[in-house]
Amino acid sequence: MNPDRELLRSLNDALAGACDQVIGNARACALAIFPDQWNAGDSAIWAGTCALLKRRGTAIRYTCGYRSYNPDDLRRRFPDGPILLCGGGNFGDVYLNEHGLRQRILQDFPDRTIVQLPQSVWFRDADHARATTAIYRDHPRFHLIVRDEQSRQLARERLGIDAALAPDTAFALADLQHQRRAPVCDILWLRRRDVESRSGQSILPAVPELSVECCDWTVPGKSDVRGWTGWWSTAYTRAVARLETARAGQRPAWLWWAELIRPHLAACRVTRGCAILSRGRVVISDRLHAHILCLLMGIPHVLLDNVYGKNRAMHTTWTSASSLTRWANSEDEAFQHARDLIRDVKGAGNDPGRRQV
């Protein structure tokens, strides 16, 4: 039994309640900004969104990524009703593909209800934030949901928007304890190696008497590209994605069937992320969705911050009561917490490495 089950239930309820307020009784929607890359966290957001919509009886009539978006296709396939924008951590001026698609949809559909599902807000350039304010503030039916109090304050101060607050949509995923496998090392360090990393190229520390693995989940390994997920991912990226960028008149009529691949891709990438996290008896990470997936699987873990405070803000707002999570301000502190967690796990006699999975 997951020790954080009551916390997870309350987060799921808070997410559903916030979405009900802005989506209302809509029986169908469009869902934009599909994350076509290997980051398991972004796929968990998409998969959680689909699960949430399915539970509330809202059918998804149209989906797209930043390459495949076409306003004429959206109007033809879903002529009326809300357009939902997938949540995550790309609301701002850092991830320009998603940022640009979000603004295009707002400009193309001034008469539609557009809901930005829970996001973290991050602008590196204050001038850029001011330049884009009018696009969000002046849309008469735009609803912004943020996933932490820090983002809510930034939305109010920089964009002039009073945003709603809700947990990350990955919390809408069902309990994932069945995805947990037997560990192969004591500590798995899932470390960012991108623009949001604080640690840079830090050296993996020696931890006496404990085995440590270090990796990230944004780059596939050989086993990933050989499997079912890798086959679909390779086909989608090399073939379908190229066709999606063609002009509307040059796209084959069957291309909309590519949308059927997206739920499968997201689910497989979440499974891959769970398998990676399961390798450690304890996980250390500065990735927010490593934290969320560990909560859903019941894995003890240590959470570090990213470069702009997203993880701390989310942890403070929603998950500080977790019995599975320890917060660390530095990598040295993280490994000390990890040692303590391993000792607790083994001392309690519930080490997952002792059972067959």
Image (cartoon, rainbow, N blue to C red):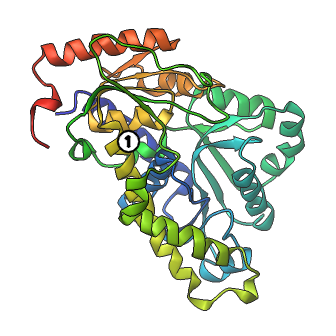
Q: Position of residue 36 (x, y in %)?
A: 56, 59
Up-down relation of residue 211 to residue 99 (above or below)? above
Mark 1 is on which residue type?
Answer: Asn
Q: Nearer the viewer, residue 239 or 265?
A: 239
* Circle 1 Cα neighbour tier, 10 Å, few/some/many (<14 / 14–19 / ≥20): many
- Classify residue 17 as left or right of residue 185: right
**Quadrant for the C terminus in the image:** top left
The quadrant holding residue 115 is: bottom right
Q: Is residue 53 visible?
A: no
* Percent x, y of residue 346: 16, 17
Horizontal side of residue 352 vs 40, given as left or right:
left
The x and y percentages for residue 23 are 54, 56
Q: For this rendering, which residue is in front, 171 or 26?
A: 171
Q: Residue at x 71, y 46 (%)?
A: 95
Q: Is residue 179 above or below residue 332?
A: below
Q: What residue did someone put label 1 on?
A: 12
Quarter of the figure with the N terminus: top left
Which residue appears at 59% of the width and 28% of the height? Answer: 310
Q: Secondary structure at mark 1?
A: helix
Compared with 200, 100 (above or below) is: below
Observer able to see residue 256: yes
Q: Residue at x 66, y 71 (%)?
A: 68
Is 65 above or below relative to 242?
above
Q: Residue at x 72, y 29 (%)?
A: 154
